[in-house]
Image (spheres, helix red, strand yellow):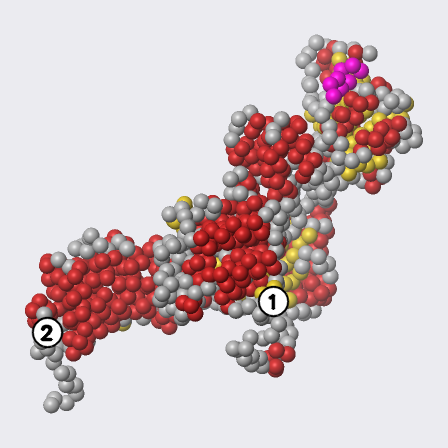
């Protein structure tokens, strides 16, 4: 025995009874015992569905896969799954097999050969979802693209590291495709590749659906009608048609594989699924929105007409029957209110065939009730069962023209159960097919339990129950999306903004600064007085107006008498001239602010500024002066600073709020201004914008004072934060907020135009900031 | 006086009383008390005034108020002509001289300083000073001032001053209850009662949305429009969309909801 080589029993000599299988086994030329064990079964399936050339291609492909040196798993997966794949993509499996083999070959030649097994294992499930060869090709293309873009290399020549995400992606593929269209899948993978290409652990988290943003992007790309898109419509629907203002709470349907949650309502709101696909039923197509409406109408009906009854004395079967009868009562009343609902309900209601369930072997109560339920809603039902007909008649008789009651329905249901009971109802095998009515809620509101259930025990930890939530010491972070220009989508909840009060310093420092600029202040004061709102303004030279403007009227009359054409604009009117301006001054407090004002030491420059000052000090002076000026004008204003340390920590520091006065508290905060970290502009703009957008003024201005390009230490792409900032400015414009940028970076021309369009100015001589800023503000708001 | 003739209401307008407003109005007119009609748009305020003018046999001068309207638009102004200036009476002055019912529709639309000119006419003085002309008009004994007003309409800025409000007796109008409104719609349009009832139900779904994206629900006036269209052979769904849903909102979500209500109501 050679050291280090494990002895594997060769199964090549295995013999099979069927000559065709035996021949195929020879052709396969494979020594794996595990394959030999299942080969006969696989061949039987293949022989049943494949023609001779197809079978040959199948065996040849299997032979190649067996010789890859990847052990028996890929071969097993292929042999077992391929007939299903071929059946799913029926008709055109010829072009598909070479495609799949091509994909396998590419994987084998790259460091990703470990991914072949999961690829083959999930291929059948994927094929069942996609149902066509073209779609499967798109899927292969997405997988190869993912592989090519995430396979790492050390020196850039040869790919040497396998893609960390690919095997996980392939494992998740069937689940992903049950939620996404192929286009959605492509977007979802693109997002993962773009953001986690250089981060193997995160990439794995993303592609194995472990991370939060993986879920978020998945949710965004789902097919069907998303709750988030129609929430307002549903709110309005509930309010308008049913006079119900209950809160709607979506629950996720994406991640529960075993138990599908169904709608319900309780004290905290009405729970509805987060997405509904359109239904193409034999009795009409129903869109996702209509399905939501059916769910809400049904629940609203319960809230209006149902009362709860005591559950303890009923058996589970009886309860189920009561629920069916009660649901039908509610729907009949709903249809009476809005006849158009019948079409929607009937299209969504299953129509089980009378002979679908065999009462000899299966518990048929559900099936009977589903048929009855359909019959109660549709007078043109196809059923002939005498008991069903009798109870349909009794139901309508009980209901009459009134609304009946849950109690009466319970009595009817009990007598129905008693009359139709069969021995087989107790069987464990329950007939579920075609009996699930998915727009109905789970009826938990219908039952009142006096005793806790016998079959469960409750172990509630008393310590846990009494635990109070910890006291909140700081504001929770607000999360903002960030614009990704490459994919033209938002990265959901990307940047976390923490808002806090700016620490305080010595207010007297600011007063001293203001004193230093006393001359400038006097000059400004004169300008400010001119700007102050004068309430009534006369508009002269009006053809139509509130009053005759005597001077002009007389001159017109003179013209008229002289035979000259008179000026007809002889009236005047008034308008009230009020200033309604809110402004938010947003300061960039990043590290670069600590730089010195460039130039020669000791040289006297500007209005009181000296070289050797830091930009920070200069900004402090300018902001103080501006704050003083705006205060004189009487406009409402706020001041805030921002800095960032990666997307997880964007600090937004509150210096002055709109309703705070320009007093020592504010001045103290301004005095303590200090610089550090980076400039994540977009998140700060969005956060500042959300305050401004809530202000009542007619004109809202966000005045931004950056000293450099948007940058952060976790971003390597140069254009990313810039395009995000531009997007943020566009968002603000849409909310009615004007953003203006006064850049302290003399070399800012190239990027401020990108971000702010026309609303920017670059300060060439930063020493002049204290006088420029207030006069700029006045120009802006004149 | 031919001038007076043109303001008379000649044929009886259809008005369905909701309560005792006709008797109460007659009492107010007998004492010449100014009257304020409050209520949402299209609920029958103007129709009521017209009806009362007809019933009392008095001329009616209606002024639709708007934002640009000034005091001179009500009182009158000097105009220029070949001989110099000439005074032209405004509608309020005309009514005060003639002894008509002057109806200022949607008074809040006018600016607040404008509305102050009506004050001397509405208390015991019953006079209208024309300061520009230097004339003091004593109101005709038959003169009465009626204003209409939609509360909570548009913005908080547009509300009446207390000093104006407290010069009027007031009627609160609202959309009639369903049965009565059905009857009104059926009478106005000649539509059968069952369809009219369905229309009223749709109107009520919209009224439930007032304050939630809609400033005002579907008014009786719009329901009558829809009923008229249906009577002329337009399919009910189309008529409802055209006359009841499209006019009141530009909001796509609300439109979709109301469209659904229309579809659900006509099976």
Q: Residue A739 versus residue A111: which sits nearer the camera?
A: A111
Q: Quadrant of the N terminus of chain A?
A: bottom left
User: Residue B5: within the magenta?
Assistant: yes
Q: Residues within 10 Å of mark 2 (few under 14, many from 20)?
A: some
* Residue A310: mark in rendering: 1
Q: Quadrant of residue B66?
A: top right
When the figure is inspected, residue A631 is found, relative to residue A545, above or below; the finding is below
Whether residue A763 is visible: no
Q: Position of residue B124 (x, y in %)?
A: 92, 31
- In the rendered structure, the residue with mark 1 lies on which chain? A
Q: Is residue A31 left or right of residue A351?
A: left
Q: Which residue is mark 2?
A: A16
Q: Secondary structure at mark 1?
A: strand
Q: Position of residue A486 (x, y in %)?
A: 38, 55
Q: Write the residue at 52% across / 50% down.
A: A393
What span is colored magenta in the figure?
A: B4-12
Q: Residue B105 versus residue B91: which sits nearer the camera?
A: B105
Q: Write the residue at 58% across / 65% down.
A: A447
Q: Secondary structure at mark 2?
A: loop
Q: Write the residue at 90% across / 29% down.
A: B31
Q: Nearer the viewer, mark 2 or mark 1?
A: 1
């Amino acid at each position: 025995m050679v050291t280090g080589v494990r002895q594997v029993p060769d199964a090549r000599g295995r013999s099979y009874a069927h000559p065709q299988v035996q021949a195929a086994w020879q052709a396969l030329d494979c020594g794996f015992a595990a394959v030999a064990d299942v080969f006969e079964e696989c061949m039987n399936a293949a022989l049943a569905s494949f023609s001779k050339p197809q079978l040959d291609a199948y065996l040849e492909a299997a032979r190649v896969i067996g010789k890859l040196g990847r052990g028996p798993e890929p071969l097993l997966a292929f042999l077992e799954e391929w007939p299903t794949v071929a059946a799913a993509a029926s008709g055109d499996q010829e072009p598909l097999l070479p495609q799949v083999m091509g994909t396998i070959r590419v994987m084998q030649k790259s460091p990703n050969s470990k991914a072949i097994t999961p690829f083959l294992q999930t291929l059948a499930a994927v094929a069942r979802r996609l149902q066509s060869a073209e779609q499967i090709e798109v899927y292969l293309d997405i997988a190869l693209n993912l592989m090519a873009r995430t396979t790492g290399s050390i020196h850039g020549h040869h790919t040497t590291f396998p893609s960390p995400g690919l095997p996980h992606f392939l494992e998740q593929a069937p689940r992903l495709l049950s939620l996404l269209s192929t286009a959605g899948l492509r977007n979802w993978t693109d997002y993962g590749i773009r953001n986690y290409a250089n981060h193997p652990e995160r990439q794995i988290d993303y592609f194995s659906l472990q991370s939060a943003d993986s879920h978020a992007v998945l949710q965004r790309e789902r097919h069907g009608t998303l709750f988030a898109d129609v929430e307002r419509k549903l709110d309005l629907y509930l309010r308008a048609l049913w006079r119900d203002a209950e809160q709607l709470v979506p629950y996720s349907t994406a991640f529960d594989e075993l138990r599908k949650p169904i709608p319900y309502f309780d004290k905290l709101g009405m729970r509805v699924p987060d997405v509904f696909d359109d239904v193409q039923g034999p009795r009409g197509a129903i869109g996702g929105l209509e399905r939501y409406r059916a769910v809400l109408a049904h629940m609203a009906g319960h809230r209006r007409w149902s009362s709860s009854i005591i559950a303890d004395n009923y058996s589970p079967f009886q309860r189920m029957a009561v629920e069916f009868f009660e649901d039908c009562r509610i729907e009949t009343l709903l249809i009476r209110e809005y006849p158009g609902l019948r079409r929607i309900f009937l299209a969504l209601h299953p129509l089980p065939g009378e002979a679908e369930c065999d009462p000899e072997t299966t518990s048929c109560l559900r099936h009977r009730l589903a048929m009855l339920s359909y019959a109660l809603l549709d007078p043109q039902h196809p059923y002939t069962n005498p008991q069903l007909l009798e109870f349909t008649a009794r139901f309508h008789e009980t209901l009459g023209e009134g609304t009946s009651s849950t109690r009466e329905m319970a009595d009817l249901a009990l007598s129905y159960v008693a009359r139709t009971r069969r021995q087989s109802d107790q069987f464990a095998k329950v007939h579920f097919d075609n009996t699930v009515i998915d727009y109905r809620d789970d009826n938990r509101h219908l039952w009142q339990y006096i005793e806790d259930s016998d079959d469960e025990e409750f172990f509630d930890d008393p310590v846990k129950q009494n635990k109070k939530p910890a006291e909140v010491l700081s504001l929770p972070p607000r999360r903002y999306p960030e614009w990704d220009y490459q994919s033209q989508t938002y990265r959901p909840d990307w940047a976390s903004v923490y808002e806090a009060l700016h620490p305080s310093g010595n207010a007297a420092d600011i007063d001293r600064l203001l004193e230093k600029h006393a001359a400038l202040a006097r000059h400004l004061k004169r300008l400010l007085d001119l700007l102050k709102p004068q309430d009534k303004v006369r508009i002269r030279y009006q053809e139509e107006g509130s009053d005759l403007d005597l001077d002009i009227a007389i001159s017109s009359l003179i013209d008229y008498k002289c035979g000259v054409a008179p000026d007809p604009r002889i009236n005047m009117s008034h308008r009230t001239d009020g200033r309604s301006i809110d402004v938010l001054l947003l300061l960039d407090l990043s590290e670069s602010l600590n730089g010195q004002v460039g130039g020669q030491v000791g040289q006297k420059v500007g209005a009181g500024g000296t070289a050797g000052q830091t930009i920070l000090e200069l900004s402090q002076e300018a902001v103080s002066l501006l704050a003083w000026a705006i205060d004189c004008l009487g406009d409402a204003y706020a001041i805030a600073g921002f800095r960032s340390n990666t997307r997880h920590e964007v600090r937004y520091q509150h210096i002055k709020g709109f309703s705070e006065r320009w007093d020592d508290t504010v001045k103290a905060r301004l005095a303590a201004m200090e610089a550090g970290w980076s400039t994540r502009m977009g998140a700060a703009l969005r956060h500042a914008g959300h305050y401004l957008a809530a202000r009542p003024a007619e004109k809202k201005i966000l005045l931004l004072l950056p000293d450099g390009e948007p940058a952060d230490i976790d971003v390597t792409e140069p254009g990313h934060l810039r395009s995000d900032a531009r997007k943020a400015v566009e968002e603000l414009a849409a909310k009615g907020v004007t953003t203006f940028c006064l850049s302290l970076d003399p070399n800012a021309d190239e990027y401020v135009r990108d971000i702010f369009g026309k609303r920017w100015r670059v300060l060439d001589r930063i020493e002049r900031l204290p006088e420029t800023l207030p006069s700029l503000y006045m120009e802006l708001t004149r | 006086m031919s001038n007076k003739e043109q303001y008379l209401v000649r044929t009886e307008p259809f008005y369905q009383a909701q309560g005792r407003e006709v008797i109460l109005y007659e009492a107010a007119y007998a004492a010449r008390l100014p009257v304020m009609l409050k209520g949402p748009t299209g609920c029958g305020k103007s129709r009521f005034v017209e009806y009362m003018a007809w019933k009392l046999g008095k001329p009616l001068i209606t002024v639709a108020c708007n934002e640009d309207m000034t005091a001179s638009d009500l009182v009158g102004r000097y105009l220029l002509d070949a001989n110099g200036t000439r005074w032209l009476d405004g509608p309020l002055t005309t009514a005060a001289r003639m002894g008509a019912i002057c109806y200022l529709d949607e008074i809040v639309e006018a600016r607040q300083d404008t509305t102050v000119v009506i004050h001397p006419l509405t208390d015991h003085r019953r006079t209208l000073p024309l300061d520009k002309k230097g004339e003091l008009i004593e109101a005709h004994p038959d003169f009465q001032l009626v204003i209409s007003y939609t509360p909570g309409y548009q913005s908080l800025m547009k509300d009446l001053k207390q000093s104006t409000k407290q010069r009027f007796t007031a009627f609160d109008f609202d959309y009639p209850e369903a049965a009565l409104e059905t009857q009104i719609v059926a009478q106005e349009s000649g539509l059968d009662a069952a369809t009219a009832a369905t229309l009223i139900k749709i109107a009520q779904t919209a009224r439930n949305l007032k304050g939630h994206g809609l400033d005002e629900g579907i008014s009786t006036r719009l329901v009558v429009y829809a009923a008229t269209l249906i009577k002329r052979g337009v399919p009910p769904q189309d008529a409802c969309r055209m006359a009841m849903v499209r006019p009141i909102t530009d909001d796509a979500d609300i439109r979709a909801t109301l469209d659904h209500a229309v579809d659900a109501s006509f099976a």
